[in-house]
């Protein structure tokens, strides 16, 4: 039976992988998936703590986070599609009109 | 009449607001209206002198209303010996400026007059404010009209000069704001009252620990040193003067620079006496460098306006030196010299503007021998110049003499060097006169310059009258500032005012033989000053009680 | 949950219902009447404002009434911010009018998204549990992503939306991770329970890490360095009224959360986090102002200036005293109105979707539009903190708070940077008043005029008669301050 700290380590690892992916990957779809990974890492954290503390709040929050993640995915994909229509590319590096 | 100070303070701004509603295309009535407002302000300010009690060292005609009561910030104004003449100088110079620009400002005359009036209010406000935050508000309010005056109506490089002026001043004043806030909250710590106070009469009584004094001293001194301007912070001044229109230069040199010296007297010395005494040699050294440096640079200027601008650096060096010599004679001399400088430099800038209007050049080389074509003009110019040089009988002499006599007691070495500055001033100003007015006429354009016009005469005559008056009868002016200066010194030294005065005068009389003259000049003032003192101003706390008495009676 | 509780939710309910209705109208055949959308939106704002005011009477006398299991509170603090939000959204609606009609994008959906954003902001202001705050934040953020990309046929707008989306979602994930750690340590999401738990606790790494991650997420929303990289690109790329909204409303909401969370939940560990935040604030002021100097594009300049203002406002949180909290409230208000006024002028100058941007466009403006030029000067002075404008009052509070809390060095940085900021604000004044030549043409519609006039009035009134707004602010914040003093 894995302990609480094992779950927390798993969550931290997933979160870090997601963060690194967002920074390094150039494909918008991959970036979006990395963001989902980060959110789900948080979910693991919340559920673990909820279990540990015996409080329901964390699990309730998890459901909210899943819902919000779905909304984010929808908006994100819409933006990606629009970008693809305009530029025929979903590479982050191709979005260079704004010199930042 | 209560509310006299408020009337003087807001009359110009009220006039400016009325002018906003006038149509743009009637320059005559606009300038006339501005002149009328500024003359009314001047008359009202004469009433201040009328109601001013000679013998009192504390604040008079005090008015106080809550402004931001939650934070102890009040609208409190009052006048005392040190600010009285500076207020008068402001109200005198504003109509002079409007008259002087009667024919020279063609672009946006309405905005010009409005800027001048707003500036007048701001300057009067800064002189009268007894609340630090209120002072700061007026201090900053001055910036924008001046910025516009330089930037809109200035010469070729006006934008650069305007921005430089603005940034220099604001950099210093923002640090001062921090100092003000810190000071206000010191009071909270010391009295545990909860609400900070910014009323200067209450802050005068604070005795801050030395390290805090040092920090705050530099926060305030930097702001004022930039404004004066003290060497090496003076670099904005020549640019601003050269680019500013004549009226702007007069106000800038005549009044705005005095904010710096006045700030030293009103805030730095009484708030941070230990730090002031400790760092006085540093400031005196800088001001002496400024005196000599300004004079030498002025000497080699080919441009008349730049010459006068650098002479300002030199003259204001005297004022700062007098302030930090910290004795009765030198400080009175400083205050008088502030007024003198406003009058004589104001007149010089005005007169340089007169020939510039006619010839559109300010180069010394383009003139020569115009005394023959412009005799009336020459007379005025020579009087203003001699006043600036410090000829006995004119105002400049009294001020510089008191400063030097006072400084000799405390810093004889620096005073000697500074005295060289007086000689240099004579050299470069006489050189200017020689080059412009005498000798053969070398340029044909100079044969037919029209002499000074009616509006210009009307502008310059009041200045000349004041120059002569102060020169001949300085007691009118010294008498009223004496008790306040005594009180200031008592605050700084923690001594009784009586002792201070006698000690400094006795010292002046014994050490330097020339100071005998001084005594004779001021003996009348001293007697009357004593009588006033018997009314009962004692030490720094005296100011507080007196103010409260005034409030009750009102 | 009782009827009274529901009544407290009334403003949010109205905003959400209104937003939904606005969304449905075009489906029901309202698309043709695009110009009606503005009036519908303004009416919705008016009703919401009334509901906000009404909700204060529902809690009359009670300073704080947490309801819904202590997740949502209607108190004077939230009412202050909610009214501010409603006014901001109403003004953004007015700013958007010409812009939308010119570009022929659908209006109903646009306003619907704005109303949803308002709903999210109001939840942020009222949230006393991290769950509520997060939901409100996401509702605001999702609406903002779409609005930033509303010009879907412009590459710049879509790119701005993409950048905003990626960085925004990452930052909210970071914030969420911080929340989960705080939850793990304290055992609750409710701010007051967190505070109670922390008061008996020693500093520990997991908690500090959680607080730092939460702060990082919020710093992204307020655009503080080093979480600021999105700001210039998004402000330039997004439709101009949306840039105006992001730099005012969205930031104000983030500050409401920032203030409430840190003042209510974390005062116990002030010593631990204040130095980190102080560094962020100092960096924001320095980087923001120095970068703004080099910009020639006005929108980018405003973006960097808004970064620096995030730094100033942070002073109020770092100081952790009553002066600081009041400073945040008043500074947010002052900043919002000055900024809206400036954006209104930029909108006035546009020639097509992305004009009115370079400093040259402002040349000689005082001849073509004297009122706009004058107001612009007042707004710029207010941002610079020059008396007698409102900005001075705001900065006075924040500087005083920092000095009082012993962060003298930070106050000095702030003051020096204020002086630096005047340099680039003056560039616009110079262009408008001192430089000759013709800049962009102006289209000064009544709506823009109204926004300018209202912002000008607020900026001057707060500057000249600060007593009233200050009293309001004290009323709105005293119950949060009380907790700080207790501890």
Image (tube, coloured by chain):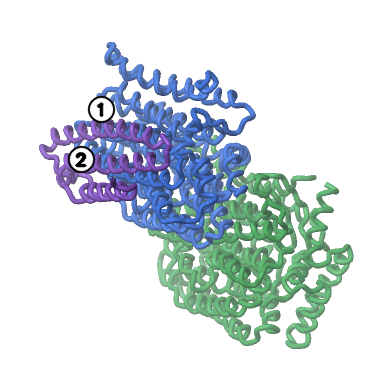
Residue C258 in sight: yes
Q: In this view, does C165 lie to the left or right of B31?
A: left
Circle 2 sits on which residue? A33
Colour applied to chain C: blue
For this orientation, the residue located farthest to the top is C29
Identify the image quadrant of residue A30: top left
Q: Which of B50 and C25 is in front in this view?
A: C25
Colour applied to chain B: green
Residue C270 lies, with reference to residue C389, above or below; the image says below
Quadrant of the snapshot with the N terminus of chain B = top right
Q: Which of B86 and B265 is in front in this view?
A: B265
Q: Position of residue B21 (x, y in %)?
A: 54, 35
Please tell me which residue is depicted at 64% across the width and 64% down the height of the picture.
B262
Residue C219 lies, with reference to residue C31, above or below; the image says below
Helix, strand or loop at label 2? It is helix
Q: Which chain carries label 2?
A: A
For this orientation, the residue located farthest to the front is A1
Q: Position of residue C326 (x, y in %)?
A: 56, 44
Q: Residues within 10 Å of mark 1 (few under 14, many from 20)?
A: few
Q: Which of B258 and B50 is in front in this view?
A: B258
Chain identifier matching the purple colour in the rendered picture: A
Q: Are marks 2 and 1 on the same chain?
A: no
Q: Position of residue C388 (x, y in %)?
A: 56, 46
Q: In this view, does C352 lie to the left or right of C14?
A: left
Residue C249 in sight: no
Q: How crowded is mark 2: few (under 14 residues within 10 Å), some or many (20 or more)?
A: some
Q: Mark 1 lies on which chain?
A: C
Circle 1 sits on which residue? C103
Q: Which of B95 and B237 is in front in this view?
A: B237
Please tell me which residue is depicted at 36% across the width and 38% down the height of the picture.
C246
Q: Where is residue C390 in the image (x, y as percent from the top left)?
A: 53, 43
């Amino acid at each position: 039976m894995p302990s609480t700290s094992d779950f927390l380590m798993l969550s931290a690892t997933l979160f870090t992988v997601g963060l690194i992916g967002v920074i390094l990957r150039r494909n918008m779809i991959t970036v979006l998936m990395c963001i989902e990974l980060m959110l789900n890492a948080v979910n693991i954290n919340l559920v673990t703590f909820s279990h540990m503390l015996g409080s329901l709040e964390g699990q309730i929050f998890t459901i909210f986070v899943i819902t919000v993640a779905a909304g984010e995915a929808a908006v994100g994909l819409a933006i990606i599609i629009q970008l693809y229509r305009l530029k025929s590319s979903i590479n982050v590096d191709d979005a260079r009109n704004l010199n930042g | 009449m209560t509310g006299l100070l408020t009337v003087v303070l807001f009359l110009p701004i009220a006039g400016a607001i009325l002018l906003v509603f006038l149509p743009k295309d009637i320059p005559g009535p606009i300038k006339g209206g501005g002149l009328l407002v500024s003359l009314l302000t001047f008359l009202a300010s004469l009433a201040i002198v009328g109601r001013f009690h000679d013998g009192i060292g504390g604040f008079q005609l005090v008015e106080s209303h809550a402004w931001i009561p939650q934070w102890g910030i009040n609208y409190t104004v009052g006048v005392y010996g040190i600010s009285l003449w500076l207020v008068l100088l402001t109200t005198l110079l504003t109509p002079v400026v409007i008259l002087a620009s009667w024919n020279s400002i063609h672009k946006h005359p309405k905005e010009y007059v409005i800027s001048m009036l707003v500036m007048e209010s701001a300057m009067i406000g800064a002189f009268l404010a007894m609340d630090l935050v209120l002072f700061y508000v007026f201090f900053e309010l001055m910036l924008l009209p001046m910025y516009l005056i330089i930037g809109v109506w200035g010469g070729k490089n006006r934008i650069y000069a305007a921005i430089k002026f603005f940034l220099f001043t604001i950099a210093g004043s923002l640090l001062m704001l921090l100092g003000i806030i810190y000071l206000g909250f010191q009071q909270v710590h010391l009295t545990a009252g909860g609400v900070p106070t910014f009323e200067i009469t209450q802050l005068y009584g604070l005795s801050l620990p030395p390290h805090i004094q040092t920090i705050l001293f530099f926060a305030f001194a930097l702001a004022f040193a930039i404004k004066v301007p003290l060497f090496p912070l003076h670099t904005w001044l020549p640019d601003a003067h050269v680019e500013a229109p004549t009226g702007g230069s007069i106000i800038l040199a005549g009044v705005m620079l005095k904010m710096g010296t006045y700030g030293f007297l009103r805030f730095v010395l009484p708030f941070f006496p230990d730090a002031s005494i400790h760092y006085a040699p540093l400031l005196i050294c800088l001001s002496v460098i400024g005196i000599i440096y300004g004079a030498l640079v002025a000497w080699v200027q080919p441009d008349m306006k730049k010459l006068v601008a650098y002479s300002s650096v030199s003259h204001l060096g005297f004022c700062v030196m007098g302030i930090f010599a910290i004795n009765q004679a030198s400080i009175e001399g400083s205050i008088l010299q502030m007024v003198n400088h406003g009058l004589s430099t104001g007149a010089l800038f005005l007169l340089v503007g007169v020939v510039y209007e006619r010839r559109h050049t300010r180069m010394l080389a383009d003139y020569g021998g115009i005394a023959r074509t412009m005799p009336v003009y020459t007379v005025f110019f020579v009087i203003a110049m001699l006043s600036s040089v410090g000829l006995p009988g004119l105002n400049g002499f009294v001020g510089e003499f008191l400063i030097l006599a006072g400084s000799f007691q405390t810093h004889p070495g620096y005073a000697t060097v500074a005295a060289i500055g007086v000689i240099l001033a004579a050299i470069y100003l006489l050189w200017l006169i020689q080059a412009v007015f005498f000798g053969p006429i070398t340029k044909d354009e100079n044969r037919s310059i029209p002499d000074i016009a009616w509006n210009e005469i009307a502008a310059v005559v009041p200045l000349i009258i004041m120059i002569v008056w102060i020169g001949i009868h300085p007691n009118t002016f010294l008498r009223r500032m004496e008790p306040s200066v005594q009180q200031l010194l008592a605050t700084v030294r923690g001594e009784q005012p009586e002792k201070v005065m006698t000690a400094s005068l006795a010292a002046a009389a014994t050490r330097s033989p020339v100071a005998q003259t001084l005594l004779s000049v001021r003996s009348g003032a001293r007697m009357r000053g004593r009588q006033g003192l018997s009314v009962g101003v004692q030490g720094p706390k005296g100011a507080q009680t007196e103010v409260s008495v005034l409030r009750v009676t009102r | 949950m009782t009827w009274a509780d529901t009544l407290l939710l009334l403003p949010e309910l109205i905003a959400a219902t209104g937003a939904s209705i606005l969304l449905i109208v075009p489906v029901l055949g309202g698309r043709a009447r695009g110009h009606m959308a503005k009036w519908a939106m303004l009416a919705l704002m008016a009703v919401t404002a009334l509901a906000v005011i009404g909700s204060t009477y529902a809690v009359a006398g009670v300073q704080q009434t947490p309801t819904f299991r202590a997740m949502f509170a209607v108190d004077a603090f939230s009412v202050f911010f909610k009214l501010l939000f409603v006014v901001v959204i109403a003004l953004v609606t007015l700013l958007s009018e010409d812009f939308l009609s010119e570009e022929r994008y659908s209006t109903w959906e646009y306003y619907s998204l704005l109303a949803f954003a308002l709903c999210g902001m109001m939840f942020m202001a009222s949230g006393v549990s991290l769950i509520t705050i997060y939901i409100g934040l996401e509702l605001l953020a999702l609406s903002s992503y779409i609005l930033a990309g509303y010009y879907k046929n412009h590459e710049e707008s879509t790119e701005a939306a993409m950048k905003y989306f990626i960085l925004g979602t990452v930052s909210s994930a970071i914030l969420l991770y911080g929340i989960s750690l705080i939850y793990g340590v304290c055992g609750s999401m409710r701010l007051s329970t967190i505070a109670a738990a922390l008061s008996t606790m020693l500093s520990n790494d997991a908690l500090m890490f959680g607080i730092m991650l939460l702060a990082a997420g919020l710093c992204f929303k307020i655009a503080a360095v080093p979480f600021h990289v999105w700001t210039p690109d998004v402000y330039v790329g997004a439709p101009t009224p949306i840039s105006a909204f992001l730099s005012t409303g969205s930031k104000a909401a983030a500050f409401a959360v920032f203030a409430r969370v840190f003042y209510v939940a974390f005062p116990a560990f002030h010593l631990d986090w204040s130095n980190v935040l102080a560094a962020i604030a100092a960096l924001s002021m320095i980087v923001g102002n120095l970068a703004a100097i080099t910009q020639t594009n006005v929108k980018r300049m405003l973006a960097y200036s808004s970064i620096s203002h995030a730094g100033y406002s942070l002073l109020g949180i770092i100081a952790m005293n009553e002066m600081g909290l009041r400073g945040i409230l008043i500074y947010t208000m002052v900043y919002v109105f000055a900024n809206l006024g400036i954006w209104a002028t930029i909108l006035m100058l546009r020639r097509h979707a992305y004009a009115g941007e370079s400093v040259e466009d402002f040349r000689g403006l005082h001849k073509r539009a004297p009122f706009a030029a004058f107001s612009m000067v007042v707004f710029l002075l207010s941002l610079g903190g020059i008396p007698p404008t409102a900005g001075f009052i705001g900065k006075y509070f924040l500087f005083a708070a920092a000095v009082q809390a012993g962060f003298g060095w930070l106050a000095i940085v702030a003051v020096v940077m204020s002086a630096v900021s005047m340099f680039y604000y003056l560039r616009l004044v110079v262009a408008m008043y001192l430089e000759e030549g013709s800049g962009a043409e102006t289209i000064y519609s009544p709506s823009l005029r109204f926004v300018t006039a209202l912002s000008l009035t607020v900026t001057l009134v707060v500057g000249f008669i600060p007593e009233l707004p200050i009293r309001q602010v004290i009323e709105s914040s005293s119950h949060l301050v009380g907790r700080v003093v207790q501890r």
